[in-house]
């Protein structure tokens, strides 16, 4: 759907004066139909429309969208849109960026003019169904609301058509005028001023008289144009009625010899190591892609280390610590190209990957992906010397290493030595105090073991009789326990 926005009154006067200088062409009118129902806050002029761009699936990326529309006659100010989640989702992309506090997202909008809409889109993943549900709420301050609600007609214009079209092809638009008011809109007229990049047999100024539109009904016209010139253009659409309601909208479209679709997607992730592989994919639709140079680049922000790329890219660092990867004239296979970028995060955090593709006679295109490294702790324990051979009566030292190979710290990890009969501990050392109860030596919990941290526990011991013995260490956090063992072979005296 093509976006629309309101233009200043001064621009409207210029548009009307230009209409007098040219006899407008006419278009056929479609039959009137019911206006689509909207979820509207009771007693307000603000509509909240929600939708899933992609089918929602647990554990997979899901694109959700909230649209606000001012369907009344008066502007509203100081809008606050809130979305509260049952459980906190994983954010992949969000635009525009909200203020995030725990499970609540908040956007603030200074003003929303009549007939104007604003879209909030975000991509998330969730592990439960309850998170994949909309719970938006809105508060706002009405500005200059009318007391005579019987007289408002509330015209709303919606332009449905392409945002991009190839030069030489048709661009078809459906211009829908809906009456959301309580009374009929009388003798409604639509005038569309085409930009220089679009052509129509009737000329650059097209006019259609829709007649009266009853309350709760809509009428539409279909406009078929030919794209003749490359560039980004705006067509001005004016709607007026005999009731005095005037609307002027601007609908944007790009015309070019082709287009580029650029997208990020995640290939795999190792949360324990803080590593992930991203795929950047480009699809090119061009009538001369064999002749035009193509450049694709992405910015890797500081905090992410580049392990490798395939195919290899040219890397350019900058003063901020970011690195730019550049692929010049990459080889296309069936008008497609992709690269794999393997990254490592030094610590948990959020980073934005920004990519851009540039090609002659095609508008530049960009893509953004939010990388989130949650971080995990991974505990490992091992004896530095797992097998010991000694003689009866000799003293020996065993050493146990506790490691955190994850990306975040471990808290309150425990270590306990279990000695078999025939082996007695004589002394010990470690990062915390220990106590001996029978054949068990328990160290106090280690408050913090940082990422990549390593702590060593040592015990001096002596064997009381010859034989094969096995010493076990139990270690872990809370109820999660692991174990490691050490074998001691004690030979008798000659």
Image (cartoon, rainbow, N blue to C red):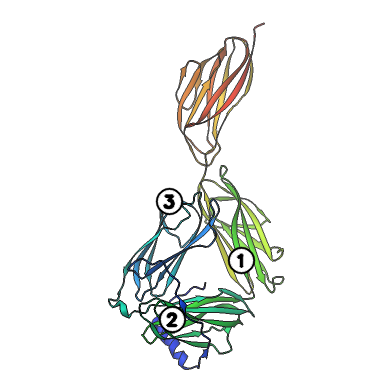
Q: Earlier in the sequence, mark 3 or mark 1?
A: 3
For marks 3 and 1, give the CA distance: 34 Å
Q: Is residue 382 left or right of residue 239?
A: right
Instruction: Name the mark nearer the viewer: 1 or 2.
Output: 2
63 above or below 418? Answer: below
Disc 2: which residue: 248
- Nearer the viewer's eye, disc 3 or disc 2? 3
The answer to whether residue 368 of the structure is visible from this angle is yes
Q: Position of residue 372 (x, y in %)?
A: 52, 51
For disc 1, the neighbor class at 10 Å (few under 14, some 14 to 19, many from 20) is some
Q: At 62% from the left edge and 68% from the top edge, which residue is drawn? A: 260
Task: Rate crowding at label 2 as few (under 14), some (14 to 19) or many (20 or more) other CA atoms within 10 Å.
Answer: many
Asked if 246 appears above or below 58 in the picture, the reply is below
Secondary structure beneath dot 3 equals: loop
Residue drawn 34% across the image and 69% down it = 44
Residue nearest the observer in this picture, 424 or 179: 179
Callout in the foreground (3, 1): 3
Front residue of 316 and 449: 449
Q: Which residue is mark 3?
A: 86
Q: Is residue 362 above or below residue 186?
A: above
Q: Quadrant of residue 402?
A: top right
Name which quarter of the figure residue 354 lies in.
bottom right
Q: CA distance from mark 3 to mark 2?
A: 41 Å
What residue is disc 1 on? 261
Whether residue 329 appears in this view of the structure is no
Taking 177 as reference, is 299 left or right?
Answer: right
Q: Secondary structure at mark 2?
A: strand
């Amino acid at each position: 759907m093509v976006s629309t926005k309101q233009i200043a009154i001064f621009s409207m006067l210029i548009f009307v004066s230009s209409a007098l200088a040219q006899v407008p062409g006419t278009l056929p009118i479609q039959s009137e139909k019911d206006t689509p129902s909207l979820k509207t806050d009771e007693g307000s002029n603000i509509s909240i429309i929600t939708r899933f761009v992609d089918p929602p699936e647990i554990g997979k990326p899901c694109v959700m969208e909230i649209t606000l529309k001012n369907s009344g006659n008066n502007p509203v100010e100081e809008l606050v849109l809130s979305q509260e989640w049952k459980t906190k989702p994983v954010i992949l992309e969000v635009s525009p960026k909200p203020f995030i506090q725990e499970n609540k997202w908040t956007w603030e909008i200074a003003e929303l003019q009549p007939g104007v809409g604003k879209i909030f889109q975000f991509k998330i993943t969730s592990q439960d169904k309850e998170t994949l549900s909309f719970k938006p709420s809105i508060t706002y301050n009405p500005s200059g609301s009318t007391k005579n609600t019987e007289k408002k007609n509330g015209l709303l214009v919606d332009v449905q058509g392409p945002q991009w079209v190839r030069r030489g092809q048709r661009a078809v638009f459906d211009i829908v005028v809906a009456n959301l008011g309580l009374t009929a809109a009388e003798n409604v007229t639509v005038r569309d001023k085409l930009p220089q990049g679009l052509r129509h047999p009737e000329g650059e100024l097209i006019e259609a008289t829709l007649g009266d539109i009853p309350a709760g009904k809509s009428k539409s016209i279909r406009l078929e144009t030919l794209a003749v010139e490359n560039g980004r253009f705006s067509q001005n659409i004016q709607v007026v009625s005999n009731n005095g309601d005037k609307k002027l909208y601007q609908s944007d479209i790009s015309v070019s010899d082709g287009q580029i679709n650029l997208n990020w997607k995640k290939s795999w992730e190792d949360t324990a190591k803080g590593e992930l592989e991203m795929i950047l994919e480009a699809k090119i639709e061009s009538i001369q892609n064999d002749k035009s140079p193509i450049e694709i680049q992405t910015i890797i922000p500081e905090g992410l280390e580049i392990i490798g790329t395939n195919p290899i890219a040219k890397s350019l660092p900058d003063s901020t610590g970011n690195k730019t990867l550049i692929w010049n004239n990459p080889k296309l296979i069936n008008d497609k190209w992709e690269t794999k970028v393997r990254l490592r995060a030094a610590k948990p955090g959020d980073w934005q990957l920004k990519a851009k593709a540039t090609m002659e006679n095609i508008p530049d295109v960009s893509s953004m992906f939010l990388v989130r490294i949650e971080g995990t702790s991974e505990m490992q324990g091992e004896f530095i010397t797992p097998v010991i051979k000694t003689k009866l009566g000799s003293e020996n030292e065993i050493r146990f290493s506790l490691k955190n190979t994850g990306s975040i710290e471990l808290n309150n990890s425990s270590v306990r030595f279990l000695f078999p009969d025939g082996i007695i501990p004589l002394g010990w050392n470690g990062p915390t105090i220990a106590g001996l109860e029978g054949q068990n030596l328990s160290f106090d919990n280690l408050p913090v073991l940082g990422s990549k941290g390593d702590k060593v526990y040592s015990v001096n011991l002596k064997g009381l009789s010859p034989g094969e013995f096995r010493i076990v260490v139990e270690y872990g956090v809370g109820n999660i326990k692991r174990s490691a063992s050490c074998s001691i072979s004690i030979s008798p005296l000659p």
